[in-house]
Image (spheres, coloured by chain):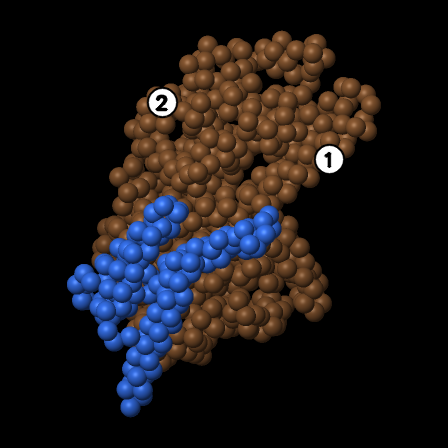
């Protein structure tokens, strides 16, 4: 197999309007992967395309389509990875993405990935796809884990009953992948007409309903026009039976006529019972169980999902991650600092022009270097957070906090977005697509900027290392827990002003515990950490040069207190003087709007020191209470430009990013004052 | 292991002792040993509807002990970058408890596997 490349864009779905060619022109044959959340779709996508999409051990990794290509024999395939869904309704954004794609039928075949350990839940989606007359290959994944648990999958009853190809695969070990490729190749290139279509046999009452529905619909031209895709293969009556009229909006007169002909409630009950019985028969005839009702997962979940111990263990896990971040990274950070100091000393001797010397040594090396020394902390933090996520532990934390989150009008699903927000707020906001309740989603989008993203980490580490070094991990834990509380309280507060309410229960399928692979952890850590490096060479460098220029001019570095930078900071001094923040602190915060890391590089430039003595300089300016207030201000104030742009694109309105801009700043200022007041008493 | 109450008692008392010994050394370890102790104590509570209740508490508390030792060992490993071997002082309590935890975890896992094998054998008969 010649692996292709991943064509997906960050935070952006791809259009998939590529023409599927007929047999004989084996190029760009479009196929897609669909399945329940967390069954290994993205893992299969990566194996087939050679892409490096991060595969998380929790549901909701893919909320938009991902597109890649691969070659097999003489054919080129375009593979579309769809979001994980249980049904093809339109309850949430990710389901809409999957449903719209499947309905438009711009593909040749669909690979439905099912979990060998939870075959039943995939069968609902399988039947729905068959009802839509989609060409399906069923890939039953995690076959290795099923074998370990004494579960043997026998695919022949499914093949005979549904007349579809079935392949047993393991994305972890690569078992069955060659067979899957061969089946994809043969099945996609066989002439469409030669494929035997499955005709589902419904009970007589349901058949009668479908027939009458279609006859009645033919009298309504608007139904023909608006639901042409649904009418093909009689899917509209079946969809109506399963999901009702909520997202169909069929004409009222049509519904009235239908109600006079049928008792719809009874019919729905009959349809549901038939479906459950059919699935139960299929699954029971395809599985042979040799084990007993025991697994390490059950044992661990018994304690880890305990309402008291579970929360304590979660706090312990986060405490351990933050302690490791500080303790392990410090020696590496010291080495980097030494390297930048040496580079600065060398360059200060060899550059003869004073202004250029100042720009390179104090501006670029001092500013950007001052931020880059935190690379070890950022990568180590993400490595261990990745370990918790990849091992399947974090979704359990979401399950645990569901009860707490519910009292704030959110669900455990929102907690997953908050955890994502610890990396970057942009994917966290995008991940809210999985939240079906619009009120909850909007409140969460507007509150997620309070989730402490990695860009703020250098500011925390600098200030915690300077003022609270003996309890560094504990203070960092406090900040992150405060960040979660802030998102929850803010969501509750904002929901009071957002109309439209609909309580949707949170259903999460706890993933299996897995020992994370180093490769997946490396991808996770790199994906999260690389933005920091990209920003260091881009926006941080530019901002640092601007800050240097503003502090150097108009008096050529003679008196920084009368520079342009001082002018900017002094504007805010009446608001911040009582907190112990002088103009340099304020100027850093102003430039931090571009990217939070710039706060640290600004301080390095404005205090005119390298990172090591920056701590000393800050101790002369700030008290522990004012430093703590500054930490909390940075935690909450204005999100970066990328986050504001994402809020705009997700809400389709400029109103909300502008609101967020002011809302977060006001809240940050209030919190800073409260923290300063309380800190002044206790510290 | 058959005598689960004794194992739970050993874990909870030992972790409490190590917690006290660490009070003046490291707050993180105090929290870790306290949590291990609480987890083991919860094992005594009578949730009899789950047959593996006590086993679960034994295994999770010993796993926490193993993770705490892994934390200590990682710290030692990274300290080697910046300081000499003679300057590094390992927390011996954490390492002792970690080794005990490994033994308990493996023993309990083997015991559960043995039960599974017996059940399989009975099923096949």
Q: Position of residue B65 (x, y in %)?
A: 37, 60
* Res. B63 image quadrant: bottom left
Residue drawn where x is 32% and y is 76% of the image: B111
Please state the chain letter of the residue tagged with numbered disc 1 in the rendered image.
A
Residue A168 versus residue A4 in the image, above or below: below
Please state the chain letter of the residue tagged with numbered disc 2 in the rendered image.
A
The mark total stands at 2
Q: Position of residue A583 (x, y in %)?
A: 54, 15
Q: Position of residue A627 (x, y in %)?
A: 45, 26
Residue A512 versus residue A154 in the image, above or below: above
Neighbour tally class for label 1: few under 14, some 14-19, many 20 plus, Cα within 10 Å = some
Residue drawn where x is 72% and y is 13% of the image: A556
Neighbour tally class for label 2: few under 14, some 14-19, many 20 plus, Cα within 10 Å = some
| Shade of chain A as shown in the rendered figure | brown
| Residue A70 visible in the snapshot | yes
* Res. A511 image quadrant: bottom left
| Residue A529 visible in the snapshot | no
Whether residue A333 sits left or right of residue A158 in the image: it is right
The quadrant of the picture occupied by the N terminus of chain A is bottom right
Q: Are marks 1 and 2 on the same chain?
A: yes
The quadrant of the picture occupied by the C terminus of chain A is top left
* Res. A496 image quadrant: top left
Residue drawn where x is 64% and y is 22% of the image: A608
Residue drawn where x is 43% and y is 41% of the image: A473
Q: Nearer the viewer, residue A547 or A136?
A: A547
Whether residue A114 sits left or right of residue B9 in the image: it is right
Q: Which residue is mark 1?
A: A343
Whether residue A113 sits left or right of residue B98 in the image: it is right
Residue B27 versus residue A667 in the image, above or below: below
Chain with blue colouring: B
Q: Which residue is mark 2?
A: A680
């Amino acid at each position: 197999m010649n692996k292709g490349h991943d064509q997906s864009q960050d935070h952006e779905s791809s259009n998939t309007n590529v023409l599927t060619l007929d047999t004989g022109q084996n190029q760009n044959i479009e196929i897609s992967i669909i399945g329940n959340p967390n069954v290994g779709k993205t893992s299969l996508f990566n194996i087939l395309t050679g892409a490096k999409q991060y595969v998380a051990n929790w549901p909701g990794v893919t909320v938009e389509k991902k597109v890649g290509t691969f070659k097999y024999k003489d054919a080129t395939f375009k593979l579309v990875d769809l979001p994980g869904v249980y049904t093809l309704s339109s309850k949430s954004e990710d389901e809409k993405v999957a449903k719209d794609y499947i309905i438009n039928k711009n593909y040749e075949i669909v690979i439905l990935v099912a979990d060998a350990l939870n075959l039943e839940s995939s069968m609902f989606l399988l039947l729905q796809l068959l009802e839509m007359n989609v060409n399906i290959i069923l890939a039953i994944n995690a076959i290795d884990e099923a074998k370990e648990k004494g579960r043997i999958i026998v695919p022949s009853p499914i093949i005979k009953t549904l007349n579809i190809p079935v392949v047993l695969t393991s994305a972890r070990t690569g078992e069955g992948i060659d067979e899957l490729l061969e089946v994809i190749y043969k099945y996609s290139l066989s002439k469409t007409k030669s494929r035997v279509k499955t005709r589902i046999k419904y009970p007589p009452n349901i058949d009668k309903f479908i027939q009458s529905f279609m006859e009645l619909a033919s009298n309504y031209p608007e139904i023909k026009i608006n639901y042409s895709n649904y009418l093909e293969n009689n899917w509209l009556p079946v969809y109506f039976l399963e999901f009702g009229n909520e997202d169909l909006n069929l004409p009222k007169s049509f519904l009235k006529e239908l109600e006079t002909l049928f008792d719809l409630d009874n019919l729905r009950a009959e349809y549901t019972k038939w479906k459950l019985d059919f699935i139960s028969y299929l699954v029971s005839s395809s599985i042979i169980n040799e084990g007993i009702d025991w697994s390490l997962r059950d044992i661990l979940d018994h304690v880890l999902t305990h309402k008291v111990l579970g929360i304590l263990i979660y706090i312990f896990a986060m405490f351990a991650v933050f302690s490791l971040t500080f303790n392990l990274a410090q020696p590496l950070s010291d080495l980097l600092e030494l390297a930048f100091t040496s580079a600065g000393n060398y360059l200060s001797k060899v550059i003869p022009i004073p202004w250029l010397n100042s720009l390179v040594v104090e501006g670029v090396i001092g500013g950007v270097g001052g931020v880059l020394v935190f690379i070890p902390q950022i990568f180590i933090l993400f490595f261990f957070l990745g370990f918790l996520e990849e091992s399947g532990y974090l979704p359990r934390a979401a399950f645990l906090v569901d009860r707490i989150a519910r009292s704030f009008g959110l669900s455990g699903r929102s907690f997953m977005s908050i955890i994502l927000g610890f990396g970057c707020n942009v994917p966290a906001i995008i991940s809210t697509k999985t939240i079906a309740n619009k009120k909850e989603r909007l409140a969460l989008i507007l509150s997620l900027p309070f989730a402490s993203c990695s860009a703020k980490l250098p500011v925390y580490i600098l200030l915690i290392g300077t003022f609270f070094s003996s309890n560094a991990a504990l203070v960092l834990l406090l900040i992150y827990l405060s960040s979660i509380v802030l998102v929850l309280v803010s969501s509750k507060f904002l929901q009071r002003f957002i109309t439209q309410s609909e309580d949707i229960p949170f259903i999460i399928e706890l993933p299996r515990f897995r020992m994370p692979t180093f490769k997946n952890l490396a991808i996770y850590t790199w994906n999260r950490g690389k933005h920091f490096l990209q920003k260091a060479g881009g926006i941080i460098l530019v901002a640092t040069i601007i800050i240097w220029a503003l502090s150097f001019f108009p008096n050529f570095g003679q008196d920084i207190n009368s520079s342009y930078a001082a002018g900017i900071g002094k504007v805010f001094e009446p608001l911040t003087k009582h907190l112990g923040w002088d103009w340099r602190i304020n100027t850093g915060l102003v430039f931090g709007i571009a990217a939070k890391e710039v706060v640290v590089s600004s301080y390095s430039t404005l205090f005119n020191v390298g990172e090591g003595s920056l701590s000393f300089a800050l101790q002369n300016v700030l008290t522990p209470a004012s430093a703590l207030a500054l930490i909390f201000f940075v935690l909450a104030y204005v999100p970066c430009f990328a986050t504001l742009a994402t809020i705009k694109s997700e809400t389709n309105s400029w109103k909300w990013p502008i609101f967020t801009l002011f809302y977060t700043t006001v809240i940050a200022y209030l919190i800073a004052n409260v923290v300063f007041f309380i800190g002044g008493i206790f510290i | 292991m058959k005598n689960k109450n004794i194992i739970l008692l050993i874990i909870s008392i030992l972790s409490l002792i190590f917690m006290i010994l660490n009070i003046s050394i490291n707050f993180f370890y105090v929290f870790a040993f306290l949590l291990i102790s609480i987890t083991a104590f919860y094992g005594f509570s009578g949730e009899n509807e789950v047959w593996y209740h006590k086993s679960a508490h034994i295994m999770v508390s010993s796993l926490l002990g193993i993770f705490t030792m892994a934390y200590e060992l990682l710290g030692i490993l990274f300290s080697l970058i910046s300081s000499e071997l003679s300057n590094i002082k390992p927390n011996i309590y954490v390492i002792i408890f970690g080794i005990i935890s490994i033994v308990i975890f493996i023993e309990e896992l083997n015991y559960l596997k043995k039960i599974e094998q017996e059940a399989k054998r009975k099923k096949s008969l």
